């Protein structure tokens, strides 16, 4: 702590002196003071590591992560020629494509049916929100068992129905889908809560006047509910996107990237290259690519979002 | 501007407060750790703490904890603290990242394929130092184990838990299919024939399962006398490419492919637990897995379980198995008292009594053959004669470069490459492509690893 | 407005069906945690006996109480740190005008796009060099600064009329006092929301605690859960599930108690 505290204090003193001398800088300094803790922490635990990651991506490393040989862009060239990395990119995109709309649709459906003023609806809301309180580790345990080929409930149910067992997590055609289902389940609680809140903040007056006009249920849904919900939806979509790209825990616990790298999502691939193969250089190159993908996607989304979203 | 000063001060207090809130405990602990050696010097009554990292989860952890407790109770000079650090891979990673810091353990269990990377890490003290200083007799250990762990006449680590792959089979299913339940199939071809017969007599049950596990592939190679890496499996020089021929390398893939075509192969992917559960649920009649499971499988199966040797191709001779499992490493940069205490614990683990109990409660074989004479082992053999198979298989192994096992630091990566290829074939992929990808990717990984060492 | 009976029936049917599906994984696990290993292995779906054996085993074999305590300390630390630091930052973004504010705000939002796993290697080295492995501050500090929290509180602070701030400035009330006496009380709900959210997410973390703790004295409960599964051996599903149930109980309770607040608060953050 002492090592950190000293330069930090000095920094603040400098800021203070400046503020005293230059009145017009006062508000800037003040703003920075409020932001200082965040900025320091972000610098140490986010921006510096990001820079360090970029640096590492130009090197080969030994097993403790020290750089040994400078290779320039070779790591980047290697991963783009590597079928494993390309596969991982593809799987990640598919996973995002399954889970983001999946989570939103499921949560939206739940939020809409739980939004009506019915007796006992509070209990249902609590149940739908419950997955938010279940950790990835615990949820993965639940699903690992459900997906179990011999004793899992899903295959037991299929057996009762007379159908063939499915290798949920071992069949490459199914694995990514299964992991997506589990992920949708895990993420739906949080999304549900936010969407429900969004629905409840819609002015009831809008519906009443629509009722007077004799509007049907789906008309109201399309013309009132969804447009009025769009800011909330926009927020939820952005968060879901970012979360989906960063998925790690359930992959590690359910499939470890298999079968045939089918579920080897990019963050897992980074983890595997860095922590299991000790190729910190290649892993860092992948991390940089992940960073840029998310950056670009988010920028696009904000641009589109600003235009489309209907603000109250 | 006073306000700013107040804010500053408040922030500072908050930040520091966050630390001081919890620092008493940590600093106390840090102080305790740092001062341990001094205390030992000044007060000989205070026991030396040995931190022991291991990767034994589940039932194995229970068995290991029991041994540690026994050791701690048996004397006052040393206290061993056993810390589970996740899987072998995770534990090794953790060690690599913190080697040389105060958080490093005194001793650590590392899997056999981590041997080279531990030596390269520079954070270890070869146990040969202690062997020489004391004149400890290592020759009492199992010969095959000495074969694996003695490199250039030096023991870098102390062997501890070793297992070999064996074939488990459902005796009741064998009987039902009209097979001889007392002679398990020995060759690939016999396994195929038996699988067919089982599936014919009971369409609900598949014949055979092979977990997509790189270790098993390595073992199946060794059993036909094939090398994994060139340069004598890396024993005469650092490997530069794979050591098996196309015929040897493909044999395993082709074997599986034939059974898939017969529809007698059960695919459980890379998951060992799924496979064993499938065996218990009578979905599959035979599978290959580490002998460390023998005790557990025999005890838990609702039918009679047989254990047989690892199969080999008909046209080859059985060469035998490579020692799996793990060994114990001593860290350098630790006070001598601590190292000596850890050495004492390592020796304790070698005793026939402990090895006997360990063998009987798990299925890892005893690295000290004297353990097989222990009453506990003899008693357990009466109940579970299957345990003996693993010992017999080990002792009938022919000593060669193939069965000595490969030495290379990128083998963990190679395993994952093999596993992906195995899965590809399990799911109907082409054998030639799968095999070629194994060779290409492993060779690339070897090259990368050799370069990254920067020598 | 009253709902017609037919719609009511349809709604209730949907509600019950959805609840069954959403709640099933938790229910099944709960049920399984009381079954013996033998029964689970046989593929029984309904327990024929009821035993607490798995719970006893899980507490006996692992220092689960210690793990729970560690998780609690870590989560509370992170929660407090996030609340203080995020609210300060959010205040600056709303009430203090200065050059480059938008750029900094964009940088803050951009941090949400950096996957923690991608920067985990250098972070680990930082904590190691500070000698903070196996310590609560090592577990908690990297998570104190939080873009999402800042974003959420910023949205909330924005609802406080600017005039209020101007008036207080004229009255000579400084920023700190305004922050403490006006802004924070008004944003109580949001702070609570963020607190619950921060607590839940930190309680559920697992990669970071896995890397930075090597000692049972500091391990968190998620890592404990991971430890229940073994690599080579057959899993004892009953024990694992008992562990999973114990792990989710504290967070589920917090969620049940704070759900309404959480929902209101998070929604305010989502709406601009």
Image (cartoon, rainbow, N blue to C red):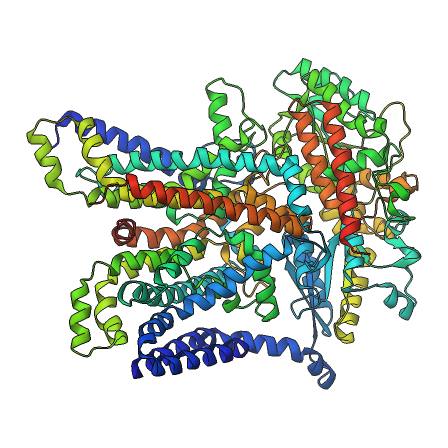
Outermost residue, top side: B200
| Left or right: where A58 falls relative to C180 | right
How many numbered marks does the figure carry? 0
Outermost residue, bottom side: B42
Answer whether residue C44 is visible to the viewer in this image: no
Task: Give the x, y percent position of residue B163.
Answer: 78, 44
| Left or right: where A301 falls relative to C224 | left
**Image quadrant in which you'd find residue C223:** bottom right
| Left or right: where C18 falls relative to B228 | left
Task: Give the x, y percent position of residue C142.
Answer: 49, 63
- B5 to A170, vertically: above or below: below
Task: Give the x, y percent position of residue B363.
Answer: 74, 44
Residue situated in front as seen by the camera: B72 or B241: B241
| Left or right: where B43 falls relative to A1 | right
Q: Residue at x 51, y 48 (%)?
A: A291
**Image quadrant in which you'd find residue C183:** bottom left
Answer whether residue B153 is visible to the viewer in this image: yes
Q: Residue at x 56, y 59 (%)?
A: A51
Residue situated in front as seen by the camera: B56 or C138: C138
Residue situated in front as seen by the camera: A161 or B20: B20
Task: Give the x, y percent position of residue B289.
Answer: 72, 36
Q: Quadrant of the N terminus of chain B?
A: bottom left
- A182 to B365, vertically: above or below: above
Q: Quadrant of the C terminus of chain B?
A: bottom right
């Amino acid at each position: 702590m002492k090592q950190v505290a000293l330069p930090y204090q000095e920094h603040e003193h400098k800021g203070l002196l400046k503020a005293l001398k230059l009145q017009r800088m006062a508000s800037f300094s003040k703003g920075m003071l409020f932001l200082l803790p965040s900025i320091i922490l972000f610098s140490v635990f986010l921006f510096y590591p990001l820079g360090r990651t970029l640096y590492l991506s130009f090197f080969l490393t030994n097993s403790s992560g020290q750089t040994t040989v400078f290779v320039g862009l070779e790591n980047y060239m290697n991963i783009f020629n590597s079928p494993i990395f390309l596969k991982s990119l593809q799987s990640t995109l598919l996973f995002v494509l399954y889970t983001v709309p999946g989570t939103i649709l499921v949560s939206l459906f739940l939020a809409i049916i739980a939004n009506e003023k019915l007796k006992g609806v509070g209990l249902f809301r609590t149940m739908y929100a419950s997955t938010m309180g279940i950790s990835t580790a615990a949820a993965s345990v639940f699903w690992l068992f459900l997906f179990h080929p011999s004793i899992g409930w899903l295959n037991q149910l299929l057996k009762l129905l007379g159908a063939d067992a499915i290798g949920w997590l071992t069949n490459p055609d199914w694995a990514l889908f299964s992991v997506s289902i589990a992920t949708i389940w895990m993420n739906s609680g949080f999304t549900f809560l936010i969407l429900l809140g969004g629905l409840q903040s819609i002015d009831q007056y809008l519906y009443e006047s629509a009722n007077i006009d004799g509007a049907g249920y789906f008309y109201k849904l399309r013309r009132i509910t969804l447009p009025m919900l769009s800011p909330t939806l926009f927020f939820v979509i952005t968060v879901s996107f970012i979360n989906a790209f960063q998925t790690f825990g359930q992959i590690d616990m359910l499939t470890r990237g298999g079968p045939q790298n089918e579920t080897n999502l990019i963050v897992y691939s980074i983890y595997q290259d860095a922590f299991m193969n000790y190729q910190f250089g290649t892993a860092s190159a992948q991390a940089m690519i992940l960073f840029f993908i998310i950056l670009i996607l988010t920028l696009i989304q904000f641009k589109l979002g600003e235009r489309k979203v209907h603000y109250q | 501007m006073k306000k700013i000063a107040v804010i500053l001060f408040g922030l500072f207090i908050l930040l520091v407060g966050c630390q001081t809130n919890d620092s008493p405990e940590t600093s106390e602990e840090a102080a305790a750790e740092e001062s341990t050696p001094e205390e030992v010097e000044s007060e000989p009554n205070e026991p030396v703490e040995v931190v022991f990292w291991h990767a034994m989860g589940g039932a194995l952890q229970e068995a290991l904890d029991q041994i540690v407790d026994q050791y701690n109770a048996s004397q006052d000079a040393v206290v061993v603290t056993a810390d589970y650090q996740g899987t072998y891979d995770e534990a090794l990673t953790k060690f690599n990242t913190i080697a040389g810091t105060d958080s490093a353990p005194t001793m650590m269990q590392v899997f056999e394929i981590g041997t080279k990377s531990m030596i390269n890490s520079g954070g270890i003290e070869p146990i040969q130092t202690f062997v020489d200083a004391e004149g400890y007799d290592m020759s009492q250990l199992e010969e095959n184990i000495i074969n694996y762990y003695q490199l250039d006449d030096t023991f870098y680590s102390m062997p501890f838990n070793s297992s070999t792959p064996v074939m488990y089979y459902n005796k009741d299913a064998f009987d039902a299919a009209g097979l001889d339940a007392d002679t398990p199939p020995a060759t690939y071809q016999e396994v195929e024939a038996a699988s067919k017969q089982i599936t014919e007599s009971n369409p609900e049950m598949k014949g055979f399962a092979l977990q997509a596990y790189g270790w098993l592939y390595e073992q199946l190679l060794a059993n036909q006398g094939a090398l994994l890496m060139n340069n004598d499996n890396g024993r005469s020089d650092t490997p530069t490419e794979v050591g098996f021929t196309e015929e040897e390398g493909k044999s395993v893939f082709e074997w599986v492919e034939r059974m898939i075509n017969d529809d007698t192969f059960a695919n459980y992917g890379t998951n060992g637990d799924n496979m064993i559960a499938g065996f218990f649920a009578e979905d599959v009649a035979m599978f290959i897995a580490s002998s460390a499971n023998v005790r557990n499988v025999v005890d838990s199966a609702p039918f009679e379980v047989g254990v047989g040797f690892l199969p080999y191709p008909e046209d080859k001779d059985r060469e035998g198995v490579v020692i799996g499992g793990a060994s114990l490493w001593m860290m350098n940069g630790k006070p001598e008292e601590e190292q000596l205490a850890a050495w004492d614990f390592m020796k304790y683990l070698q005793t026939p009594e402990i090895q006997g109990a360990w063998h009987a409660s798990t299925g890892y074989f005893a690295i000290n053959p004297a353990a097989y004479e222990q009453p506990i082992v003899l008693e357990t053999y009466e109940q579970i004669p299957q345990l003996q198979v693993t010992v017999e298989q080990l002792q009938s192994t022919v000593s060669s470069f193939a069965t000595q096992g490969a030495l290379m630091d990128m083998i963990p990566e190679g395993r994952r490459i093999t596993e992906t290829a195995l899965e590809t074939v399990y799911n109907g992929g082409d054998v030639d492509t799968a095999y070629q990808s194994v060779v290409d990717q492993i060779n690339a990984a070897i090259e990368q690893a050799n370069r990254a060492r920067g020598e | 407005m009253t709902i017609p009976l037919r719609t009511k029936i349809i709604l209730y049917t949907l509600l019950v069906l959805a609840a069954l599906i959403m709640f099933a994984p938790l229910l099944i696990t709960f049920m399984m945690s009381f079954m013996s290993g033998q029964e689970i292995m046989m593929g029984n779906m309904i327990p024929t006996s009821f035993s607490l054996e798995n719970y006893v085993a899980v507490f006996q074999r692992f220092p689960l109480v210690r793990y729970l305590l560690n998780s609690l300390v870590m989560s509370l630390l992170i929660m407090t740190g996030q609340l203080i630091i995020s609210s300060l930052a959010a205040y600056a973004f709303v009430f203090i005008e200065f050059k480059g504010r938008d750029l900094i705000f964009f940088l803050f939002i951009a941090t949400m796009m950096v996957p923690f796993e991608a920067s985990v290697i250098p972070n680990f080295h930082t904590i190691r060099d500070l000698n903070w492995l196996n310590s609560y501050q090592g577990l908690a500090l990297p998570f104190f600064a939080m873009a999402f929290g800042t974003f959420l509180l910023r949205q909330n602070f924005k609802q406080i009329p600017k005039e209020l701030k101007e008036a207080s400035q004229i009255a000579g009330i400084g920023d700190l006092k305004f922050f403490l006496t006006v802004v924070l009380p008004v944003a109580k709900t949001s702070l609570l929301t963020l607190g619950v959210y921060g607590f839940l997410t930190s309680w559920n973390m697992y990669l970071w605690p896995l890397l930075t703790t090597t000692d049972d004295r500091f391990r968190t409960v998620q890592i404990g859960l991971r430890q229940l599964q073994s690599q080579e051996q057959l899993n004892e599903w009953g024990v694992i599930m008992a562990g999973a149930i114990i792990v989710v109980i504290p967070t589920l309770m917090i969620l049940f108690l704070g759900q309404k607040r959480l929902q209101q608060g998070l929604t305010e953050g989502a709406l601009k």
